[in-house]
């Protein structure tokens, strides 16, 4: 896992901000500090130690610059990555792109079976979050149970210890539910010898990008 000193974060750009140089060879990651989808990409960037390789460009989503939609990303959402003359969007696709096209520790295992397993976890993230958010309208402990059962069963698939994709998956889920941390911590009481404590893990990553 790459480590680095705490980063000095730039202020979010609003509608009055000037257009930064585009496609000048500098990779740029457009995010919102508060957007959980953008945080996925932000975490990936920092996990791989790319703070000096990929420039962070935060946006004020309530007052975003018009040039972002007109010149950068017509979809007008975050995150988006400017790299090699093109712009990549969609957080999960962007995570895989960064992992494949930049140096740093790989998010995916080398073993083909484990790589397939990691892809399944990535694909399941949005289903999981939707199921859990929906459960908050009723009885979370009862309705969200199957979603957590699925994850615990999946994370127990391999018995040779945790790998980086499991760490990332759990961090991603944590940041999708910033106001529900106590609930998540109680639900994620895995076998202590197999998985690191999520509170310690997320604290370590928080120091890297907050």
Image: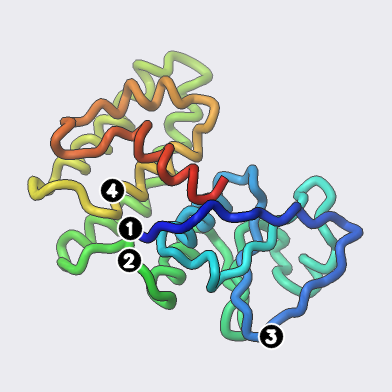
Spatial CA span between label 3 and label 1: 29 Å
Q: Residue 83: x percent and y percent? A: 58, 78
Spatial CA span between label 1 and label 4: 13 Å
Question: How would you rate the neighbour count of disc 2 (Cα within 10 Å): few for under 14, some for 14-19, many for 20 or more?
Answer: few
Disc 1 and disc 4 in contact, CB within 8 angstroms: no
Q: Earlier in the sequence, mark 2 or mark 1?
A: 1
Q: Earlier in the sequence, mark 4 or mark 3?
A: 3
79 left or right of 142? right
61 left or right of 152? right
- Residue marked by disc 2: 105
- Residue marked by disc 4: 166
Q: Secondary structure at mark 3?
A: loop
Number of numbered discs overlaid on the protein picture:
4
Name the residue furthest top.
139
Task: Choose between 11 and 136: the one closer to the eye.
Answer: 11
Q: Residue 52: x percent and y percent? A: 54, 70
- Residue marked by disc 3: 24
The answer to whether 61 is drawn above or below residue 22 in the figure is: above
Q: Earlier in the sequence, mark 3 or mark 2?
A: 3
Q: Residue 11: x percent and y percent? A: 75, 53
Q: Earlier in the sequence, mark 3 or mark 1?
A: 1
Identify the image quadrant of residue 17: bottom right
| Labels 4, 3: front one | 3
- Residue marked by disc 1: 1
């Amino acid at each position: 896992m790459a480590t680095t000193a705490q980063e000095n974060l730039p202020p979010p750009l609003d509608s009055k901000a000037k257009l930064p140089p585009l496609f000048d060879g500098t990779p740029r990651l457009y995010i919102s500090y508060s957007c959980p989808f953008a945080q996925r990409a932000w975490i990936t960037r920092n996990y791989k130690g790319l703070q000096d390789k990929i420039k962070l460009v935060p946006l004020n989503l309530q007052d975003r610059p018009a040039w972002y939609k007109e010149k950068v990303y017509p979809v007008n959402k975050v995150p988006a990555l400017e790299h090699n003359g093109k712009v990549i969007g969609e957080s999960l696709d962007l995570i895989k792109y960064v992992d494949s096209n930049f140096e740093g520790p790989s998010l995916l295992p080398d073993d083909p079976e484990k790589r397939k397993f990691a892809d399944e976890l990535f694909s399941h993230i949005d289903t999981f979050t939707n199921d859990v958010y929906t459960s908050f309208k009723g009885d979370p402990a009862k309705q969200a149970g199957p979603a957590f059962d699925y994850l615990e069963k999946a994370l127990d698939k391999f018995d040779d210890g945790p790998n980086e994709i499991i760490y990332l998956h759990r961090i991603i889920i944590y940041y999708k539910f910033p106001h529900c941390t106590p609930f998540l911590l109680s639900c994620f009481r895995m076998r202590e010898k197999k998985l690191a404590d999520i509170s310690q893990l997320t604290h370590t990553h928080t120091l890297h990008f907050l």
